[in-house]
Image (tube, helix red, strand yellow):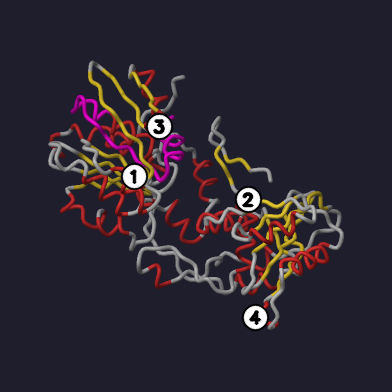
Amino acid sequence: MAVEYTPPSAKQMFILKWSFDPKWKNKNAFIADGSIRTGKTMWMSQAFIYWAMSNFDGMDFIIAGKTIASLKRNVIKPLENYLRPRGYNIIERQSDNKMIINYGGVTNTFYWFGGKDESSQDLVQGLTAAGCYFDEVALMPESFVNQATGRCLSVEGHKYWFNCNPSNPYHWFKRHWIDDLKSKKAIRLRFNMHDNPILTQQMIDDASAMYSGAFYKRFILGEWVSADGLVYSNFDEETMIRDVPDGVSITTYIVSADYGIYHPMVFILWGKGSDGIWYALDTYYYDGDEHQLQKTDEQYADDFVHFLQGIKPQGIIMDPSASSMIKALQMRGYKVVKANNDVNNGIRVTQMRMDDGSIKFTNKMQPLFKELKTYSWDAKAAEKGKDQVIKKFDHECDALRYFCMKVLRPKEDKNNGVQMYKDF
């Protein structure tokens, strides 16, 4: 099925044309960075194929994403939908993670790679390629990108294509590529959402409302900034602390938990109100070190039953490392699911749900309030280009994040691109 889209903006058109313009013939790389929803992936991936098919025949190329799954979903499938109606013959070889494209008598092979960690560099060894396209390169380790770009050095006319949303200003890609354009023979083009003609102002406003703090500056303003200071600097006691109003009934209960043997054990009881808001109703917090008495999983399970006071939760979202505690609760008949422990995305989603009013906290959540006022980004890690939190006084915050990531994490509706909620 053909995909309809409006004519490209000036910046999007530049992506398509730069590699064919004699003015830029001495440039080996193109970098598109900036805010989300700008069409970077759509136009970069198309331009990469057009360039490859116009300049080479019988050659191999690299297309990389953070993972193969995300690459197929975000790049390959949309790309095929754009190209096939325009006469490109595409043969997928799923088992080999590649596609063979034929157009106008020219045939080239495009290999798919996931660059999620340091070991990914081993995947590209031995391949000779004429060019590389990296989707969301800031999510990849430098070793993988170096190994992939090195596969092209023996091919005359090779080029590299990078797109990404900004990250930490000390990130390796910022320091070694964006800040070193001259030696890399690279062009950089910065994008914001106004560079995408398909977006209305309402769409831009809706996207902007999804982010706070450093994530807002990166994903909306397109700035390379550090995540520093308090993690939840958006916490507002006046608007976010509220007991369940009179007339609002709780329709569903869920518990999120952070596990601790030598660290605090935390349970947070959540209730979904008939007003659509999730309320953090109460919390259990036990620090074995503070009490100088460690509890067993069975004792914690006993405490959990007492904590609920007869409430039957729909499920328990548990720290994924707590296998023994999960079994102890399952033995008592509770449904337990493992939490998604993606810390930075979890923080972003939690900030979003705090800001948009999807969650509220009752006055019984005092241990959480203490943590929200001290939970901070690690400044030393930031200097190394990493977004890391200080692992101290964070157990209530972890349980909060587990809930938001499992119950209130947005996902794209592939039919119309709007945000949808996951059901627990």
Q: Are marks 4 and 3 in contact (CB under 8 Å)?
A: no
Q: CA distance from mark 3 to mark 2?
A: 27 Å
Residue bearing mark 1: 163
Q: Tell me which label, 3 or 1, sits earlier in the chain.
A: 3
Q: CA distance from mark 4 to mark 3?
A: 51 Å
- Which mark sits nearer the N-terminus, 4 or 3? 3
Query: Which is more N-terminal, label 4 or label 2?
Result: 4
Tag on residue 289? 4
Q: Nearer the viewer, residue 284 or 200?
A: 284
Q: Residue at x 29, y 49 (%)?
A: 145
What's drawn in magenta, residue-wise? Answer: 50-78
- Give the distance between the C-alpha atoms of the residues marked 2 and 1, in whole angstroms: 29 Å
Left of 103 or right of it: where is 358? right
Kind of element beneath mark 2? helix
Location of residue 241 in the rendering, given as x and y in whole percent from the top left corner:
71, 65
Element marked by disc 4: helix
- The picture places residue 22, in percent across and down from the top left corner, at 13, 34
Residue located 30% across and 33% down the image: 13
Give the alpha-carbon distance from disc 3 to disc 1, as whole Å.
Answer: 15 Å
